[in-house]
Amino acid sequence: MAVSSSSFLSTASLTNSKSNISFASSVSPSIRSVVFRSSIPPSSHRRVMTVRSKIREIFMPALSSTMTEGKIVSWIKTEGEKLAKGESVVVVESDKADMDVETFYDGYLAAIVVGEGETAPVGAAIGLLAETEAEIEEAKTKAASKSSSPSAAEAVVPSPPPVTSSPAPAIAQPAPVTAVADGPRKTVATPYAKKLAKQHKVDIGSIAGTGPFGRVTATDVETAAGIAPSKSSVAPPPPPPPAAAVNEKATTTNLPPLLPDSSIVPFTAMQSAVSKNMIESLSVPTFRVGYPVNTDALDALYEKVKPKGVTMTALLAKAAGMALAQHPVVNASCKDGKSFSYNSNINVAVAVAINGGLITPVLQDADKLDLYLLSQKWKELVGKARSKQLQPHEYNSGTFTLSNLGMFGVDRFDAILPPGQGAIMAVGASKPTVVADKDGFFSVKNRMVVNVTADHRIVYGADLAAFLQTFAKIIENPDSLTL
Amino acid sequence: MQSALSLSFSQSSLPLANRPFCSSNAAPSFTPRNLRFCGLRREAFGFSPSKQLTSCRFQIQNRRIEISASAGNGAPSKSFDYDLIIIGAGVGGHGAALHAVEKGLKTAIIEGDVVGGTCVNRGCVPSKALLAVSGRMRELQNEHHMKAFGLQVSAAGYDRQGVADHASNLATKIRNNLTNSMKALGVDILTGFGAVLGPQKVKYGDNIITGKDIIIATGSVPFVPKGIEVDGKTVITSDHALKLESVPDWIAIVGSGYIGLEFSDVYTALGSEVTFIEALDQLMPGFDPEISKLAQRVLINPRKIDYHTGVFASKITPAKDGKPVMIELIDAKTKEPKDTLEVDAALIATGRAPFTNGLGLENINVATQRGFIPVDERMRVIDGNGKLVPHLYCIGDANGKLMLAHAASAQGISVVEQVTGTDHVLNHLSIPAACFTHPEISMVGLTEPQAREKAEKEGFKVSIAKTSFKANTKALAENEGEGLAKMIYRPDNGEILGVHIFGLHAADLIHEASNAIALGTRIQEIKLAVHAHPTLSEVVDELFKAAKVDSPASVTAQSVKVAV
């Protein structure tokens, strides 16, 4: 059954064409339009920092490891309002989710530096907190200068550490940011460059200035944003684009002209993050292996455990987790192309479509947790997703991803491997299929096709085939799932 | 004639009062570079008797020279060389001289630099040339605007020297016009630095002349706050900027009044990016708040401009040693350091300081106040004891009442009226002001907050009428519907308290309102006047018609305040 045993055979859809039966509706509850807002426990963010006197700056927190800037969705508090420690002050949209940011100190929201709908880089002051009412005025004058030069801090912000299986770094991150608010080197950007950066949501601190005295010019911003520099009578010839922008540029400049009446919609933070990840994925050599799996037994089991709150997602995640435990290389990740790491945990991320985006809540230790706990956990994650309360480690700690389009009647598809993971499994619908067994007897069985995309630097065809075989065995004899 | 040139260059006294203006310590900063008044010029004329000898006050030391000047205008006075001597041949002095000749006075005008003063040489005139260019550049660069007309223009560009030449050619032309108009009337143009030696006695260069009446019209120079080093190349004042020797990529403009705003219009149209530094909490102080809000939306926000408000530029160092211009900002209130800017150039537009040093005021016991010469409402100079100095007047920027070219001219005419036997008091509230950005801003009379304050004090009601350029046919035909006209008036008697216009050709539209205020015309009268259709002036017509006056007509008899 294993289709490609040779590691070089990595043509797209190798398998399929076999029979499947019912199995739709499986994971449907998880696919919902949700935006995340997580109210973070105080310990997870100390972006409210001390500046001189008793005025503290509220910084744009780093809410995920990939977040470089955040958009202010709304200020929950208004200027002059009293704040108690632990109260939510502002809702920030990161590349992944909307999150409430709480204050870590008592005081007054003295000034809002970055208004609603505006974007600020991670680490930049977005508001000022005065300890007493008397200091509000002082804070306000301070804010006046802040708002026009929001880039003082971010120039020295270290780039977020790479995603790892451990969720901790993502949360611990903001600390270094705050310590360097008055760093030695500050970004100098021209007025128009600042305007463009805001408009195109480019983090101006991350742009290398090519203008006189190393300042960031409008052309730099346009290059970084991947748009053609607008002609200007005095602008110097466009400087060579920074390396990071090359890819983006290549993908945009070849596009045909817009059709009349089409409208341009800028990416949301989440869409930008997806786009960034997808382009990054192009640098990973991937291949795909498909495998048909009989699901009669699984369907029967599902009927049995459904009343106990078990979902199909949990069943599939558990099966994948158990198979991964036997094939650790599929659960490994390769970051630099020179080495790879076996991940100690099996964290199965499950792709979920949400309004205007895509998020992957993670079922941690999918191999170890029992089916019921896993189901419970999944419900909790979906609930959090709906109320926008997913925390960073709950969506960015996956080591293997599961994507299921079966409930839409899709019989097979292949998925793009997310950067940092070894493999992703695409699950098609289970449908009744005529099957001939080894004795030549025909029968009708429920069958689904799973298709795994893997990083060929670390996972070879045989590895994947063996993994799929194990996975199929588990699905076809699902009793072990309930153990 | 030239008195109609409006001096967008000097700030109205309102915003000035709020600035760290010209206290005595500012004085040393404008000695050498800005000599413009009272110099000596040999091209004078062959005529002239005046036979007094004296020592020279300025550069020349104690040389006694005899010079004569013959009279070509007016009837020779019996005991004086002239009926009227004007020190300073700017727009104020020029206006006074022309009117004096018309009144039959034998008149001399003393100029130490070039005829025309600030307005013609370093102010409104050359700046209008630059703004004419910037307006066109802006229009040609605006693809959307051009497309709406169905026009196709390939890349618009400019030649810096060509633009600069246009400005200097215009200044030369206007200066010649001014000079010729005075020569034609027979005004004696005496070249040299003028100073008052005593009552009715003036010295210029090495010469001493006497006059029945004397007008000081020495004007002003750009004010440079201390801590700012002007090198004329990268840190400049309006004097340098008007020569347009360079168009920096990024220029900081200190001060967002008339001067700063106009230059931001010029520089952004020519491709510069601009950073405003404003000491007050908002940009464009001194304008009606509603107008400045709208103006900010049109003139600042969509352009390549950012700004810092509530800050002083405490130190500005010109670009040198491979470093850019450095600007240190401190909080305007707390004086705490706030930020440092690195730009390519800085334009100091913090207002203007009176040029009254070396005028010999000590000879007549007059003490300046922050450099300004104190005068009463008739422009008569007040001495240190609070008494009027007989036969001595001061007009224009030097008295600081209203630092606008046309105000100086109006004051000069008012003085001539007085010395020729007609009492006259100028109503400064009827003097319009304009800022020639694209679109323009103009105003006359009180702003809304000023009017409301006055109304509270004097117990009357204030109403506001507004019209939009969006409803005006001519403005829409020009695709320039952005704009607002606003009138502040008394609903009880129809008196116009103030009119503010932001929109296409606002500077030309204000005069219907300023004339109405000057003549005491009430809304109920002027609203019946007919305006040609379609014209922009209908914006003002609509304004009058939109006003709701309680009692219809017949109140005119009560109007008291009549002035010109």
Image (tube, coloured by chain):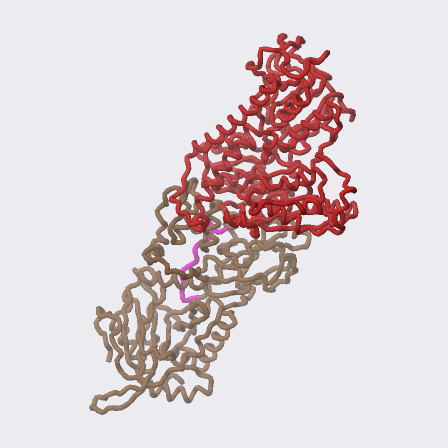
**Along the viewing direction, whichever of A259 and A250 lies nearer the viewer:** A259
| A133 over B56 or under it: above or below | below
Q: Is residue B180 covered in magenta?
A: no
Q: Quadrant of residue B157?
A: top left
| A112 over A359 or under it: above or below | above
Q: Is residue A153 covered in magenta?
A: yes
Q: Position of residue B71 (x, y in %)?
A: 64, 13
Residue sitting at x 76%, y 43%? B556
Give the magenta part as a residue range: A152-166
Q: Position of residue B145 (x, y in %)?
A: 46, 49
- In the figure, what tint was chain B given? red
With B49 as the anchor, is A69 left or right in this view? Answer: left
Can residue B192 be seen by looking at this rendering? Answer: no
- In the figure, what tint was chain A given? brown
| B134 over B485 or under it: above or below | above
**Magenta span main SS:** loop
Q: Quadrant of residue B403?
A: top right
**Along the viewing direction, whichever of B183 and A240 lies nearer the viewer:** B183
Residue sitting at x 46%, y 55%? A201
